[in-house]
Image (cartoon, rainbow, N blue to C red):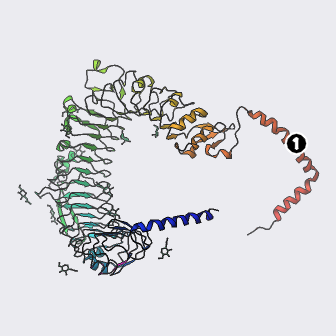
Amino acid sequence: MPDQGLIPVLFCLLAMWRILTPVSSHPQYSPCKLVQKAALCNNGNLSSVPERLPGNLEELQLNYNQIKTLHDVSFLRYPSLITITLACNGLEKVQSNVFRDSQLLENLNLANNNINIGFEETSLALRTLPSLRFLDLSENKLTDEMASTLLQNVSSLEYLNLSGNLLQRLDETSFRDLHNLKDLDLQRNIMFEIDSAFGSNPKLQRLNLAFNYLPCLTDFHMTQLVVLNASYNFIEWFISRQDLNDTFQLETLDLSNNRLFFFPFLPTRSKLQNLYLSHNILRFYEHLADNRTLQNATTSVEFYNLKKHIKNVTAQLWGDDLHGDVSSLDTLDLRRNRVDYFPDGFIQKMPTLSRLWMATNCLETLNFSTEQFSSNLYELDISNNKLSQVSANDGSLSMLGNLTYVNLSRNNLKELPFGLFSSLPRIHSVDLSYNNIGICLTDERKINTRSITECLQWNNIDSLRQLHLRGCNLEAVPNSAFTGLSLTHLELSDNPRIDVQDSLQCLSRTLQHLGLGNTQTRDIDLSHFQSLKSLNLSRNSLYHLPKSLYQIDLKVLDVRDNRLSTIPFGEARTLASKLQTIFLSGNAFNCCQTEWFKIFESAKTINMVAVSDIECQDILQTTHRVQDSERFYCLEAGESILWYILLLLPICLFLTGISIVTFLTYKPKLLQTSIKKKYLKPTSY
Ligand SMILES: *[C@@H]1O[C@H](CO)[C@@H](O)[C@H](O)[C@H]1NC(C)=O
Ligand SMILES: *[C@@H]1O[C@H](CO)[C@@H](O)[C@H](O)[C@H]1NC(C)=O
Ligand SMILES: *[C@@H]1O[C@H](CO)[C@@H](O)[C@H](O)[C@H]1NC(C)=O
Ligand SMILES: *[C@@H]1O[C@H](CO)[C@@H](O)[C@H](O)[C@H]1NC(C)=O
Ligand SMILES: *[C@@H]1O[C@H](CO)[C@@H](O)[C@H](O)[C@H]1NC(C)=O
Ligand SMILES: *[C@@H]1O[C@H](CO)[C@@H](O)[C@H](O)[C@H]1NC(C)=O
Ligand SMILES: *[C@@H]1O[C@H](CO)[C@@H](O)[C@H](O)[C@H]1NC(C)=O
Ligand SMILES: *[C@@H]1O[C@H](CO)[C@@H](O)[C@H](O)[C@H]1NC(C)=O
Ligand SMILES: *[C@@H]1O[C@H](CO)[C@@H](O)[C@H](O)[C@H]1NC(C)=O
Ligand SMILES: *[C@@H]1O[C@H](CO)[C@@H](O)[C@H](O)[C@H]1NC(C)=O
Ligand SMILES: *[C@@H]1O[C@H](CO)[C@@H](O)[C@H](O)[C@H]1NC(C)=O
Ligand SMILES: *[C@@H]1O[C@H](CO)[C@@H](O)[C@H](O)[C@H]1NC(C)=O
């Protein structure tokens, strides 16, 4: 049947095609769409360059076609071309004179082809392009030799993409003629060595070496480079040349996902702003610097390469001033390393640092007074460390006027400096989850004479919007705990003994997300929370959804792992009309009361997350997927199992009687023959 339906549709499409194509200015049939001086001929199944396009074309897009060869005459008719894109064609050969008349060509995209097959002829063709600035040769299975042949004499190039090829080794011949190169992408090759490769590229500013097999970057002296991305390699050492007096232009250095175990030996003068070092095994060794036992330990490292050149790169491994110039740093990403302390004066060396990401390290203490963070500090993430102590004096806190986001979750904190957050005028988001910091019961200020406190007072921190206090062993929360706050986001999950109901009411105007998972909440009145959009009540042994939920304009509701048995018809309708996302798995719903499911299912606007995990139980305690309602019978508790037994018993008795009579009548013979039949049957093997 559907086949028959297809014909008119195809016909219709064809008709539309006929109507639409003349719009593309040319009377003849053409798979191209003309937009001003550009012809878009992508996805056209073309096997050659279309011939009847306007002669003044400046851009020709031929991506995703089947053009295997570019012939000498292919672009003859289009001398004004500035851009040609031929990605994903299986292109193998480019004849040497094909661009002879395309002297204006600046951009050539040959990505994802088979240039490796005809690379020699292609290289002759590229040499005839005096204005070529952008060349994309990514994904072409090119080896070192092929690439250096292709790039001979293409000296006008400014942007070159060689990502996704088979380059292994770069040396001084690789990019010898590319004197104007500014941007070079070498991602996703199989490079293991770079030896004096960029000496002829004095204008190179952006270099991407990500996803290769480089074991080290030593003797780094590309002072003009602005962005270096060497993430996802196997780099153990990054050492820049220390004897250069020039200022390195480097602004962004990405060494994340490598094997660094020393902080990189950065240039002594640079403009470095963003330093990404996450996912290494880096730590600091200053504590060893004046250790007698290490005095005789090596202080220099030697690096050998394939040509047996020995680079005597000396690095003062154990000194206390080996970090180079970090004075312009804005973002320092040290996530997932092994840092257990900051060397003396380390943070102080970064007077403009605004983001410090330290999640998942081994820091044990943090002293705001000694570290002297920059007054620009905006984001501080020291989550998932081993912090047991954070100290600060008033002076050091008053320096943190820009601090907006603080994440200290998953540490061993039991106390914090008194008034830590109330003295931060711009604090917006605080995460103290999984520590042992309570909420003060009384006004500690009056009784506390120490500078350290085991509980915090949150009232009247005007700027605070997000507060995360998951798993803090919170119990009693005073009614005034959150007064004077305009929180939009409050996370109190995993505090099984918390008693919070009354203290929340003062947040009813502003709160948008409330997390009360695993808090033994039984019922909660949220009817005044008119801004609440997202509520988490998972793992709470709820038997019913709180009535007040139907009155507010909730978008996301998580009630997983509770004891809900049904959602009454009317309420389900109300929810279905408002909710966008609901989590319901982990409840034992009643298989006989699943109208709510049909309502949610038919409401197209609501997403039931993990819908196939939502289960119900029948009266025999058998579990079914609510989704499969046609596959199970509903045994209502009201109908009682007795009825079924009463109904079935006579039938069973009757059938049993008949069977016995039959059996006795035909008995042993029947039995014997059936056994015989069974065992005498020839086997199939
Ligand atoms: C593409 O063109 C080839 C011939 O050049 C033809 O065999 C093939 O069926 C075409 N494919 C499509 C999807 O039109
Ligand atoms: C490259 O250009 C130089 C002069 O600029 C020329 O001498 C040399 O022959 C050219 N090489 C190739 C392979 O075309
Ligand atoms: C280089 O090409 C690859 C693959 O075609 C692409 O993912 C990457 O973004 C390109 N690089 C640049 C800098 O455009
Ligand atoms: C470095 O390259 C990787 C891989 O392409 C990318 O994920 C990362 O964002 C890049 N780093 C920077 C700083 O752009
Ligand atoms: C760098 O400057 C120092 C003194 O400022 C000088 O002794 C040294 O020779 C200079 N090095 C270079 C490579 O210019
Ligand atoms: C010196 O190093 C040894 C072994 O690494 C260590 O046990 C000792 O505590 C260190 N001494 C000092 C003063 O850091
Ligand atoms: C260091 O070397 C000197 C002489 O080379 C030797 O006298 C001294 O005992 C060594 N120290 C250690 C701790 O090995
Ligand atoms: C490297 O430097 C060390 C000490 O400075 C020296 O002993 C060694 O001979 C040097 N090696 C080479 C290859 O120059
Ligand atoms: C923090 O540093 C300051 C100044 O260096 C010092 O006076 C104070 O004792 C330190 N606090 C702790 C708890 O170590
Ligand atoms: C704090 O850090 C933890 C662990 O790194 C992370 O899971 C959590 O989302 C962060 N909190 C906030 C508010 O970003
Ligand atoms: C916040 O940072 C700006 C620079 O971005 C600085 O001028 C200002 O003094 C800082 N504010 C405070 C309160 O420290
Ligand atoms: C709700 O809280 C639980 C337990 O704290 C958590 O596992 C779950 O991811 C939260 N739900 C949502 C939707 O974030």
- Is residue 95 within the magenta segment? yes
Residue type (three-letter) at the residue carrying disc 1: Phe
Q: How many marks?
A: 1
Q: Which residues are magenta?
A: 91-107
Q: Residue at x 40, y 67 (%)?
A: 24
274 lies left or right of 4:
left
In the picture as drawn, the residue positioned furthest to the top comes out as 446
Query: How far across and down, in percent of the image, does residue 98 sit?
Result: 31, 79
Query: How far across and down, in percent of the image, does residue 516 sit?
Result: 46, 32
Q: Main secondary structure of the magenta part?
A: loop
Query: Quarter of the image holding residue 503?
Result: top left
Reply above or below: 451 against 242: above
Q: Quarter of the image containing the C terminus?
A: bottom right
- Mark 1 is surrounded, within 10 Å at the Cα level, by few (under 14), some (14 to 19) or many (20 or more) other residues, namely few
Query: Is residue 148 visible from the viewing direction of this image?
Result: yes
- Dot 1 lies on which element? helix
Reply above or below: 378 against 483: below
207 lies left or right of 319:
right
- Give whichever of 540, 607 is nearer the camera: 607
Q: Which residue is mark 1?
A: 654
Query: How far across and down, in percent of the image, does residue 660 sit?
Result: 89, 47
- Is residue 517 within the magenta segment? no
Q: Quarter of the image containing the N terminus?
A: bottom right
- Give whichever of 679, 424 is nearer the camera: 424
Reply above or below: 218 against 402: below
